[in-house]
């Protein structure tokens, strides 16, 4: 019986794939499988993965004939997974020896639906620890209660799918699959759905790994979409529209929507503040589509959000809102989000 399935998508990461695969080897054992998903790479990545499929214990190679993006690649791995537990890793990141086995021991001990774990951000030779924004560690909590408060960083602001481990029952309930076609921010609707619908989670580190830090995220990779200012970046708008729509349909919408709107606004302001990274045509699309997004938001909630934001971001968003021609007040959150 497979105890753990680790889904690892790869796309044009020939420089880093060997390090990722070497790290996986340190966690290999008979009841762990590694689902290596090649998302139609055009460099030497396929050759590296073919060799790994022969040499890495527990490895299974899955290939896309056309490039589908990270969300679809993860879904391909999920559909093929046989494990009682599931985890993710990106093809340009790596783990310390014992990370996956240690996190597996932790989630089995806690008996919850999923666990979240800290990670190390690696930018060149620099290292910085990124913590899950949840104060209580090593205890089982209710995911829904970790969404709020709206005015502070919370668990839904730490969306990284690879920073955790998940029981198969979540996949069977449809909570682990990603929205096909989203090329960026694919983990935002995912983390919100997980926190609204799952019953239990905990923040913990992998057992037996020094400092509980076994996960290393490589930042600044040239092929990463976070480094590219083309139209694919704008998928964050579709992702957050999905977050707002699903949250507006939740029985607890009145309480949760301020957090969703605030986060959406913060991301829009972030992208507008980095306008020089976008191609001119993409920047025009960003402004037009972001203005329309503000118009779709529940306006009383948006008003309260802008009043509470710092002046620089609030001015930027109000200016964009005026660009959209203003929006009618009231009308109900659910109807406006769905419009």
Image (tube, rainbow, N blue to C red):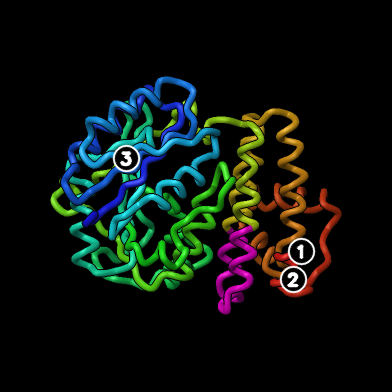
Q: Residue at x 42, y 60 (%)?
A: 155
Is residue 312 toward the left or the right of residue 321 in the image? Answer: left
User: Sequence-wise, which precedes: disc 2 or disc 3?
Assistant: 3
**Please, is residue 205 above or below residue 254 in the view?**
above
**Quadrant where the N terminus lies?**
bottom left
Q: Residue at x 55, y 43 (%)?
A: 184
- Density class for disc 3 (Cα within 10 Å; few <14, some 14-19, many ≥20) is many
> Main SS type for the magenta part?
helix
- Density class for disc 2 (Cα within 10 Å; few <14, some 14-19, many ≥20) is some
Secondary structure under badge 1? Answer: loop
Q: Which of the pair 18/132 is nearer the observer?
A: 18
Which residue, given by chain and number where applicable, does mark 3 sit on?
Answer: 60
**Please, is residue 266 above or below residue 233 in the view?**
below
Which residue, given by chain and number where applicable, does mark 1 sit on?
Answer: 339
> Are the residues at dot 2 and dot 3 in contact (C-beta closer than 8 Å)?
no
User: Sequence-wise, which precedes: disc 1 or disc 3?
Assistant: 3
- Residue 319's x, y, as percent? 77, 49
Mark whose residue sits in front, 2 or 3? 3
**Please, is residue 177 above or below residue 125 in the view?**
below
- Density class for disc 1 (Cα within 10 Å; few <14, some 14-19, many ≥20) is few
Q: Which residues are magenta?
A: 242-262
Q: Which of the pair 62/264 is nearer the observer?
A: 62
Q: Which of the pair 231/301 is nearer the observer?
A: 231
> Are the residues at dot 2 and dot 1 in contact (C-beta closer than 8 Å)?
yes
Is residue 163 toward the left or the right of residue 239 in the image? Answer: left
Q: Residue at x 69, y 28 (%)?
A: 279
Which residue, given by chain and number where applicable, does mark 2 sit on?
Answer: 335
Q: Does the magenta run of residues contain 258?
A: yes
């Amino acid at each position: 019986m497979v105890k753990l399935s680790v889904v690892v998508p790869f796309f044009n990461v020939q420089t880093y794939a060997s390090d990722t695969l070497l790290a996986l080897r340190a966690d290999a054992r008979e009841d762990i499988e590694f689902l290596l998903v090649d998302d139609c790479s055009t460099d030497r990545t396929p050759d590296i993965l073919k060799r790994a499929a022969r040499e890495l214990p527990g490895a299974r190679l899955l290939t896309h004939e056309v490039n589908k993006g990270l969300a679809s690649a993860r879904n391909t791995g999920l559909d093929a997974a046989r494990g009682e537990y599931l985890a993710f890793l990106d093809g340009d990141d790596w783990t310390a020896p014992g990370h996956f086995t240690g996190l597996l021991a932790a989630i089995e001990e806690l008996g919850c639906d999923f666990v979240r774990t800290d990670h190390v951000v690696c930018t060149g030779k620099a290292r910085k620890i990124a913590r899950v924004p949840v104060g209580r560690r090593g205890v089982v909590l209710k995911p829904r209660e970790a969404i709020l408060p709206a005015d502070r960083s919370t668990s839904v602001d730490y969306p990284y799918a690879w920073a955790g481990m998940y029981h198969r029952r979540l996949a069977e309930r449809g909570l682990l699959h990603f929205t096909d076609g989203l090329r960026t921010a694919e983990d935002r609707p995912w983390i919100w759905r997980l926190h609204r619908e799952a019953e239990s989670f905990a923040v913990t580190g992998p057992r037996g790994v020094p400092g509980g830090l076994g996960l290393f995220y490589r930042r600044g990779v040239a092929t990463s979409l976070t480094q590219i200012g083309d139209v694919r970046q704008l998928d964050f708008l579709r992702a957050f529209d999905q977050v707002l729509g699903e949250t507006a349909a939740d029985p607890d919408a009145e309480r949760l929507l301020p957090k969703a709107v605030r986060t959406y606004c913060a991301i829009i302001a972030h992208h507008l503040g980095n306008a020089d990274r976008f191609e001119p045509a993409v920047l025009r699309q960003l402004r037009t589509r972001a203005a329309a997004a503000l118009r779709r938001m529940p306006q009383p909630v948006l008003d309260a959000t802008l009043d509470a934001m710092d002046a620089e971001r609030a001015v930027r968003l109000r200016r964009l809102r005026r660009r959209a021609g203003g929006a009618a007040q009231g009308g109900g959150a659910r109807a406006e989000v769905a419009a």
